[in-house]
Amino acid sequence: MSEASGVEASGRGGDPPAVLHAPSALSRKDIEGVDSSRQLDDVLALPDQLRDALWRVEAAQVPEQDTAAGMVVAGMGGSGIGGALARAALADQASRPIFVTRVYGLPTWTTPETTVLCSSYSGNTEETLACYESAGALGARRVVATTGGRLAELARADGVPVIPLPGGLQPRAAVAYMIVCSLEVAALCGVGPRLTAEIDVAASHCETLVAAWGPDAPEDSEAKALARAIAGTIPVIAGAGLTAPIAYRWKTQINENAKQPAFSHELPELDHNELEGWAGARALGRFCAVFLDDSDAHPRIKQRLELTAALIGESAERSLRVQTRGESALERVISLVLLGDLVSLYLAVLRGVDPGPVAMIERLKAGLSSE
């Protein structure tokens, strides 16, 4: 892979990975031929969405209220990931716990002194609705982020502040709104500092990255090069600290957009179990290891990443290392969220699948509703 791509790669080499569809280029025209619902436009709009999200939180007029017990973000899928990414962006600036729950209830330690942000893009996510009801029963302070649905109806009837989200997106494409909502609510309840200026700077930085990695960028740009390196393999994405929730985001975006298996793990825990499993990877399939590195990672994490990548590289089809971009923690989080979203869309094009529909998820929902 060319040095211009900014991707460090190693592996077994040999023939390029087989793909179901391999256009001559990952151009705008190639993408539009597959992307019927224009998911690419939503990804490229990430900078504007960050700014719009700030306005929407302000418009909701969520009152400031010090919350001694911390904050819980209740949400599933693309609606829940915003809380995890916000927690990573705040890092040690958070003065109280931020917990993300992805189940039908709240942590047992939730008290009336806890702020619960219920995030559901559709407003009809049953797990989040259950958390909303649980928070009300406990007397906890509630805030809602949604486009409408049952969640908005309940919140307005209960006098709970509602942050209105724009309609027309796939829930996974609303990640900028969910990150900003989580950051702003954390500030309003005293869990962390106000990052309004940092969000604006991150949006400007993101505009530069959109130009560098988007469909009009050269074919050896980082996002396109990464997609071609991963294509035809099962990617296993590893993060550490700030990049751990981003690794999970990459996994879920590849699942939903490229319609293929992908997995994620976290260093240093990966070195205590998954590492050994890589010894059998070559005999079982074509696996690609992707390591998300951060410039501010702990020195021992960096050493582990180097050694782990070298060991896994002996059995992986490819071993790739990707760096965050930016100065602040928020800029660095946003940089890899954007990169992963683009990589997942480019993978969809290389596979010849439309990234928009989520037929398997809809079938599951239909089955649950018929019970």
Image (cartoon, grey):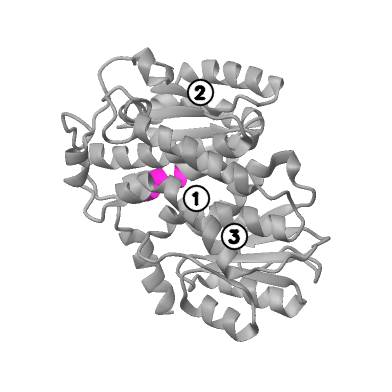
- Residue sitting at 43 percent across and 47 percent down? 46
**Residue 245 screen position, x and y as percent:** 57, 43
Q: State which region is magenta.
A: 251-256
Q: Which of 46 and 285 is in front in this view?
A: 46
Query: CA gap, disc 3 to disc 2?
Result: 32 Å
Q: Which of marks 3 and 2 is nearer the N terminus?
A: 3
The residue tagged 2 is: 279
Q: Are marks 1 and 2 in contact (CB under 8 Å)?
A: no
Query: CA gap, disc 3 to disc 1?
Result: 24 Å
**Residue 256 screen position, x and y as percent:** 37, 50
- Residue sitting at 45 percent across and 23 percent down? 320
* Mark 2 Cα shell of 10 Å, populated few (<14), some (14-19), many (≥20): some
Visible in this render: residue 243?
yes
Q: Which amino acid does label 2 sit on?
A: Ala
The residue tagged 3 is: 102
Task: Using the image, tell me which numbered label, if any, was put on residue 256.
Answer: none
Pair 1/2: label in front: 1
> Is residue 282 found left or right of 218 in the rendered image?
right
Q: What residue type is labelled 1?
A: Leu
> Is residue 344 found left or right of 353 in the rendered image?
right
Visible in this render: residue 77?
no
Q: Are marks 3 and 1 in contact (CB under 8 Å)?
A: no
- Residue sitting at 34 percent across and 66 percent down? 363
> Is residue 265 found left or right of 166 in the rendered image?
right
For the C terminus, give its image quadrant: bottom left
**Residue 254 among magenta residues:** yes
Q: What residue type is labelled 3?
A: Arg
Q: Which of marks 3 and 1 is nearer the N terminus?
A: 1
**Residue 103 screen position, x and y as percent:** 60, 63
Q: Quadrant of residue 306?
A: top right
